């Protein structure tokens, strides 16, 4: 299955793409994007907060290396389940209603983690939080992709990635501040965790007044409501033109609809597309990005930083992630997705190679500490500036409208299970193999990922979702 797309193509213009967007419409799109991406902020905070909370939690809850891995990875296991359930729910009940339900889960999970009296309760609460993280990782990008104009889809969908890394930066910064203010007092990690309840409240109240995805409404044959929503986020002429395109595909999809697993079994092109989606999901994770996000403080401590200094230095990882994501959003409007993904893979693989070399060859102390920090920052620049935004964007684009939530959900399950395995085994790998050998393993996986992207990943930039679906149907048939 070789689906290379090396021939440059002119972007297909969306209906009415030359219409000037009225200022009120632009403001409405920005507001919808801001509110929906609070799901991304929670995703980022809840995955990043464990980085600084874990050392303090270890003492209070009596964690061992095995239970450390369980506390960290229980969220990831929950995210795998939450992704597929969230995807199916968003296809059945709508994107907006699913996000509202996820906001409740975010609040309950964060509160459960904050109040957890034992390791067992913490693992369960983190699993519940993972259900929300996984559901948000699927539903928010799909919602944004379906409500965005074709020419702005890359920039608007990747705002969610910006909010994810902003949430991680918020977690790193608040961890450092709370640790310095709270010192060695018992339960300081609980204050780190409870902050996540606040954006959950904002997400719930905000989504109460946001519209449903116009494409989901069309998939339910609710065409009058589809037009009403399109008029909120398009000019009048473009809304009517886009309604015709969306309606035509929705009618065709209704005639062909099988849905879910039946769709994959009955249609070879959908099955092949799913395999590509699985590959894109795995590529994003086997860079080892979440070893930096979950265990960054320990990595820097091992390199030579004191515990408090490592917490502070780890903020640099959060800052570069945010800045790199800004750069990625800018690039997505100017360069094709596939070359951007390959450049990110080459950069992260090189940075991991140097982390391994420095950890192996430099003596413990200040020089090694800052050399490793410089490489983690470089790694995150390529990861968050190229790989992560392209991954979530492409997964929100490539699946057919009738099963977009389900398709992205299943791909996200693969992503989260890969993340789960890495988060679970990383402490044991470092303990058994040394940190340098562990990163050399990720280098080898990075080279395999680069080969996969070159051979199998299609280009998606510049097409409307309907045009892209027609292209992919032809290419994978």
Image (spheres, rainbow, N blue to C red):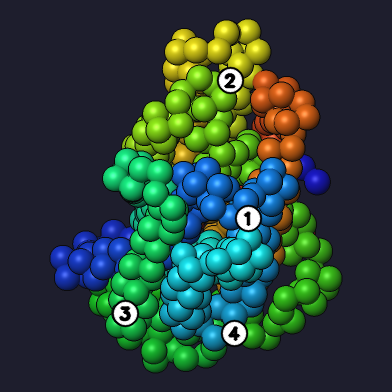
Q: CA distance from mark 1 to mark 3?
A: 30 Å
Viewed as shown, does residue 265 lie left or right of 52?
right
The residue labelled by disc 4 is: 92
Q: Are marks 2 and 1 in contact (CB under 8 Å)?
A: no
Q: Nearer the viewer, mark 4 or mark 1?
A: 1
The residue labelled by disc 1 is: 71
Neighbor class of circle 3 (other Cα within 10 Å; few <14, some 14-19, many 20+) is few
As helix, strand or loop, the secondary structure at mark 3 comes to helix
Q: Nearer the viewer, mark 2 or mark 4?
A: 2
Residue at left offset 64%, top offset 85%: 254
Neighbor class of circle 1 (other Cα within 10 Å; few <14, some 14-19, many 20+) is many
The residue labelled by disc 3 is: 205
The residue labelled by disc 2 is: 355
Q: CA distance from mark 3 to mark 2?
A: 44 Å
Neighbor class of circle 2 (other Cα within 10 Å; few <14, some 14-19, many 20+) is many
Q: From the top left corner, tell me how far across and down residue 262 is, in percent.
A: 80, 77
Task: Please name whichever residue, 46 or 148, is drawn nearer the observer in this view of the structure.
Answer: 46
As helix, strand or loop, the secondary structure at mark 1 comes to helix
The residue at the far left in this view is: 23
| 411 shown above or below 217 | above
First-in-chain label (1 vs 3): 1
Q: From the top left corner, tell me how far across and down residue 313 is, in percent.
A: 39, 30
């Amino acid at each position: 299955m070789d689906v290379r797309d090396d021939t440059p193509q002119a972007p297909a213009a969306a209906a009415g793409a030359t219409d000037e967007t009225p200022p009120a419409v632009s403001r409405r799109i920005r507001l919808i994007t801001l509110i929906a991406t609070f799901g991304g902020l929670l995703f980022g905070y809840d995955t990043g907060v464990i980085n600084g909370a874990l050392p303090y939690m270890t003492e209070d809850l009596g964690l061992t290396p095995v239970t450390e891995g369980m506390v960290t990875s229980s969220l990831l296991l929950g995210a795998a389940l939450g992704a597929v359930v969230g995807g199916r729910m968003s296809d059945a009940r709508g994107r907006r209603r699913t996000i509202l339900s996820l906001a409740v889960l975010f609040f309950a999970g964060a509160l459960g983690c904050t109040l957890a009296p034992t390791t067992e309760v913490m693992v369960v609460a983190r699993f519940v939080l993972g259900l929300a993280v996984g559901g948000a990782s699927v539903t928010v990008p799909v919602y944004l992709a379906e409500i965005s104009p074709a020419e702005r889809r890359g920039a608007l969908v990747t705002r969610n990635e910006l909010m994810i890394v902003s949430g991680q930066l918020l977690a790193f910064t608040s961890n450092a501040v709370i640790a310095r203010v709270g010192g060695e007092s018992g339960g300081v990690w609980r204050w780190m965790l409870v902050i996540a309840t606040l954006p959950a409240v904002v997400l719930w109240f905000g989504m109460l007044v946001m519209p449903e995805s116009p494409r989901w409404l069309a998939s339910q044959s609710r065409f009058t409501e589809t037009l009403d929503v399109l008029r909120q986020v398009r000019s009048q002429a473009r809304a009517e033109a886009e309604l015709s395109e969306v309606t035509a595909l929705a009618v065709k999809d209704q005639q062909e609809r099988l849905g879910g697993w039946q769709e994959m079994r009955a249609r070879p092109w959908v099955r092949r597309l799913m395999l590509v989606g699985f590959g894109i999901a795995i590529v994003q994770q086997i860079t080892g990005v979440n070893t930096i996000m979950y265990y960054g403080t320990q990595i820097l401590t091992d390199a030579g930083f004191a515990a408090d200094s490592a917490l502070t230095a780890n903020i640099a990882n959060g800052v570069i992630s945010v800045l790199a994501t800004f750069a990625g959003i800018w690039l997505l409007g100017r360069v094709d997705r596939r070359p951007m993904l390959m450049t990110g893979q080459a950069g992260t693989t090189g940075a991991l190679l140097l982390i391994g070399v420095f950890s192996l060859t430099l003596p413990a102390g200040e020089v090694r500490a800052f050399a490793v920090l410089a490489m983690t920052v470089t790694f995150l620049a390529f990861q968050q500036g190229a790989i992560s935004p392209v991954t979530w964007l492409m997964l929100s684009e490539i699946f057919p409208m009738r099963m977009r939530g389900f398709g992205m959900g299943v791909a996200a399950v693969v992503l989260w299970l890969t993340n789960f395995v890495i988060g679970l085994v990383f402490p044991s790998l470092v303990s058994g193999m040394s940190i340098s050998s562990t990163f050399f393993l990720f280098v080898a996986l990075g080279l395999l990922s680069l080969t996969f992207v070159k051979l199998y990943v299609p280009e998606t930039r510049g097409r409307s979702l309907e045009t892209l679906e027609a292209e992919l149907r032809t290419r994978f048939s």
